[in-house]
Amino acid sequence: MLLASAVVVWEWLNEHGRWRPYSPAVSHHIEAVVRAGPRGGGSVVLGQVDGRLAPYILDLQSMHQFRQDTGTIRPVRRSYYDPSSAPGKGVVWEWENDNGTWTPYDTEVGITLQHAFEKQHPWIDLTSIGFCYIIDFSTMGQINRQTQRKRRVRRRLDMVYPLVTGTLPKSQSWPTSPSVVSTPPAPACTCPQCLLVMSIKAAVSGGSSRGAGVTASQQQLQQPQPPPPRKAVSLSGSTKLPIPASAHKPQDGTATVRSSLKTLASQVSRRQAASTPALTTTGSPASPPSAKGKVTRASLNTLNRTNLQRLAIAQSRVLIASGVPTVPVKNLNGSSPVNPALAGITGILMSAAGLPVCLTRPPKLVLHPPPVSKSEIKSIPGFSSTCRKTTKKQTKKGKTPEEVLKKYLQKVRHPPDEDCTICMERLSAPSGYKGPQPAVKPDLVGKLSTCGHIYHLHCLVAMYNNGNKDGSLQCPTCKTIYGVKTGTQPPGKMEYHLIPHSLPGHLDCKTIRIIYNIPPGIQGPEHPNPGKNFTARGFPRHCYIPDNEKGRKVLKLLLIAWDRRLIFAIGTSSTTGESDTVIWNEIHHKTEFGSNLTGHGYPDPNHLDNVLSELVAQGITEESALPEKD
């Protein structure tokens, strides 16, 4: 197949069956290894070019991406596109996710968007390519046709994807160039894991003379021949260049893993051949089988399960000490988990010994419950409504800081000989506060009526003026709250109702779903930067608690926290680093429905008790649960 030129986009298959593009920088890195042929080693460490991809290794022989810490394996493919399309121009289209970060569209979607954008269309409907979205170029927004939810989109320039010219390979498997000839063995790898494997093979090579010989071609990963490629035309009118069909069809998971591990063992053997006399040198993976076709190699097939386990446990100590990354492995026959510290070497040994091996796959992130119809959503018994709204803060007038403090303080005529924990000056001396001077004498001292802690009145007034000025006071030492504490939560809406699904760990009851929705706006006088815009990322936010007695108690107190504007605040996000945005305010919520991968899901037997403690810290207790207002 002769082509003048094409851009190469490397892509991986996600759990939803969508091919997701690697970044241009990562694609360039992979192409560099491909061009190096066998000298490149046949595998790509993606973390070398993108630190966020540190756990991932791409195996060019099996065309799979392997995650070392979880054992997840995903197919990859090498796709070719017209140089005049978006990848060829370095144009990347992205949408804003719930965390406020940007996610690139699939390559074909990006090409479609760029084509419509260049044609100066005001909008484009993506329904015809399988997405229920409309992209409005005038507002740079994505609109969900079903829910009408809007997200921001953006178009940015990045590196141009790598360009290839001439004859493209018939297969996406490594090595890609049919003209590559056999090369001398690469320098021996000295990483701890390769040395470990080689030491085990060398130890058993003396006693494995009766092992059956294998051909050089049997040591290579067998690739099925792909059918003739076919053209795929995108809706934008640009032609997507042919892609071998072998990349579209994932191989059987167990067979792929066993083959990959055997390939790894054989690669290590080949790389160590020059420095390990006990082993027989084999041909390069790019070399054709020899005419005689048979060579001998050290075999692990003579090891039984007991010896295999003994070797793995003995050698794993080296792995632990050297910090070699390992992966979870399971024996398919017994389905018993293997200690992760033994997993890497155990997987290699078990595969080499002919035992069935597979890498465990991590559980999937389940943020939301199964679809719920409107008729299935019910109000919660004991709650007269299903929605609460907050408006802008109503400023309390007529009370000066001095008048507020009088309710909570007792004057101390003879201060003790200790420090004021606000200004760190002696209580017997005047206050050390140097800011705007309150209308209180600096040498007056008062004691808080409930907790009994003593401070300069001057310091307490200054602390109150720097706070929310809502008529409440919180002891800086023991955090006892005097009055009713309120927060600075922006205006928004809180919805709550029952859904007919159970949470993990609470299978005996239904689930209370809480939906918070706060729009972006302008900061008020109580916020960090009055008059400045603030963002509200990830709304509406869905949260879940079990519909049991304690769960309903938590909900009642959360409603009080919402009314007092204590659930959210405006500040700097600890996850994205963005400032002037809506953030959680120290009352934890569970946002994962069916999993607990992020720590914000179930099962968590202590969650409701922890929330009750956090509410108490905000001054909300069972005594605060007055009759619900409609």
Image (cartoon, grey):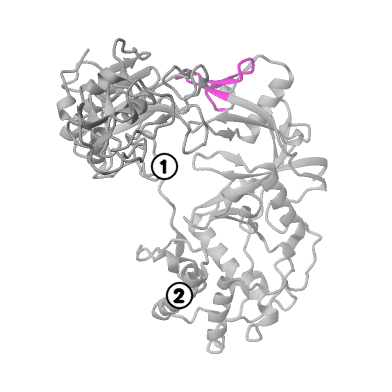
Kindly report which numbered mark, 1 or 2, lies closer to the viewer in this rendering.
Answer: 2
Regarding residue 236, the answer to whether it shows in the image is: no
Disc 2 marks which amino acid? Arg
Say above or below: 298 vs 562: below
Q: Residue at x 57, y 72 (%)?
A: 192
Q: Residue at x 47, y 61 (%)?
A: 327
Q: Which residues are magenta?
A: 130-152
Residue 512 horizontal/vertical position (percent): 26, 29
Badge 2: few (under 14), some or many (20 or more) residues near its Cα, within 10 Å?
Answer: few
Callout 1: helix, strand or loop?
loop
Q: Which residue does the numbered mark 2 point to in the structure image?
A: 317
Residue 399 horizontal/vertical position (percent): 29, 14
Say above or below: 142 vs 316: above
Point out which mark residue 149 bears. none
Q: Is residue 461 left or right of residue 315?
A: left
Q: Is residue 609 left or right of residue 218?
A: left
Q: Which residue does the numbered mark 1 point to in the structure image?
A: 365
